[in-house]
């Protein structure tokens, strides 16, 4: 066998090795899992129960039949939750937070996407607020309804340049939040639209202010929230 003939299989072998090694160096980020669950957290009247994605106070837990530790899906401000890349198997689903909730429920994610709504009784049911601007003030009308065995210990009306505002959002170099404490379960709160708030709304908030009401029951350290609304800054 001449030298030229010997080199051909050697070159082919080297090319295969390079290809295999290059493939091994890639990071696999998509495992092809297509189990999908989504849904809404609703009160007894079918209204969304709002969460705060900045903390895990209101969380949906999803535990696979072959798993030991549940996944945590935080509830969004509009009351929705979702995970669209779960391993296709049966799961136990339940919710925890400042609500009276049903027990664990079983869902099968081996087929099509499952829409699984969960009906709860919030410790404090907070209606979607309404707001109007008068002069240099924002008038926010709110309503808080405690469930049986609960009383509102704290109540706050939040106005912020942050879309997902919560009680711990506060203010910083690139965002502004105003928190007005109120003493009754219903009424109208007045928030002064100061220059810092308005300039940050224009600069970072798309010209909008985000308004929601938060209240805490005397039976917990977690907060219930209203669905947030958007008000165009003057």
Image (spheres, rainbow, N blue to C red):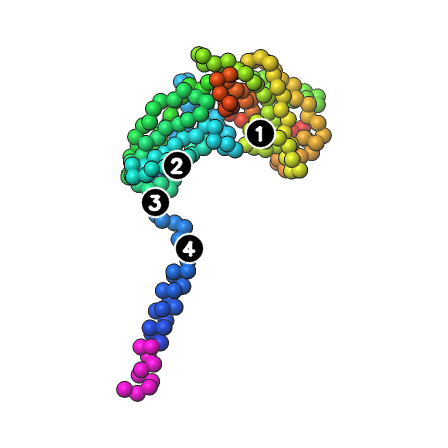
| Residue that badge 3 annotates | 33
From mark 3 to mark 2, how far is it between C-alphas? 15 Å
Residue 113: in sight, yes or no? Answer: no
Q: Please provide percent x and percent y for residue 8.
A: 33, 79
Image quadrant where one finds the N terminus = bottom left
Left or right? Give the position of 67 relative to 176.
left
Asked if disc 2 and disc 1 are in contact, CB closer than 8 Å, the reply is no
Magenta stretch?
A: 1-10
Q: Return the residue nearer the eye: 9 or 219.
A: 219
Residue 168's disc number: 1
Q: Please provide percent x and percent y for residue 77.
A: 49, 29
| Residue that badge 4 annotates | 27
Q: Residue at 58% across / 29% down in the picture?
A: 168
Q: Is residue 219 magenta?
A: no
Label 4: few (<14), some (14–19) or many (≥20) C-alpha neighbours in 10 Å? few
From mark 2 to mark 4, how far is it between C-alphas? 23 Å
Residue 71's disc number: 2
């Amino acid at each position: 066998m001449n030298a030229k003939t010997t080199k051909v299989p050697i070159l082919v072998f080297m090319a295969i090795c390079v290809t295999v090694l290059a493939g091994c160096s890639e990071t696999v980020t998509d495992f092809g899992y297509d189990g999908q669950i989504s849904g809404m957290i609703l009160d007894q009247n079918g209204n969304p129960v709002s969460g705060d994605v900045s903390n895990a106070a209101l969380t949906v837990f999803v535990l696979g039949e072959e798993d030991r530790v549940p996944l945590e899906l935080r509830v969004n401000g509009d009351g929705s939750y979702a995970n669209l890349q779960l391993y296709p198997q049966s799961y136990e689903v339940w919710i925890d937070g400042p609500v009276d909730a049903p027990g664990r429920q079983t869902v099968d994610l081996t087929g099509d996407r499952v829409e699984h709504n969960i009906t709860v009784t919030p410790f404090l049911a907070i209606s979607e607020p309404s707001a109007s601007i008068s002069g240099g003030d924002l008038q926010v009308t709110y309503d808080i309804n405690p469930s049986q065995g609960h009383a509102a210990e704290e109540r706050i009306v939040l106005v912020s340049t942050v879309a997902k505002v919560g009680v711990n959002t506060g203010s910083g170099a690139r965002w502004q939040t105003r928190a007005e404490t109120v003493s009754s379960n219903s009424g109208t709160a007045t928030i002064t639209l100061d220059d810092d708030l308005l300039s940050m709304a224009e600069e970072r908030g798309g010209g909008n202010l985000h308004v929601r009401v938060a209240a805490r029951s005397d039976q917990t350290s977690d907060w219930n929230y209203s669905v947030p609304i958007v008000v165009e800054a003057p």
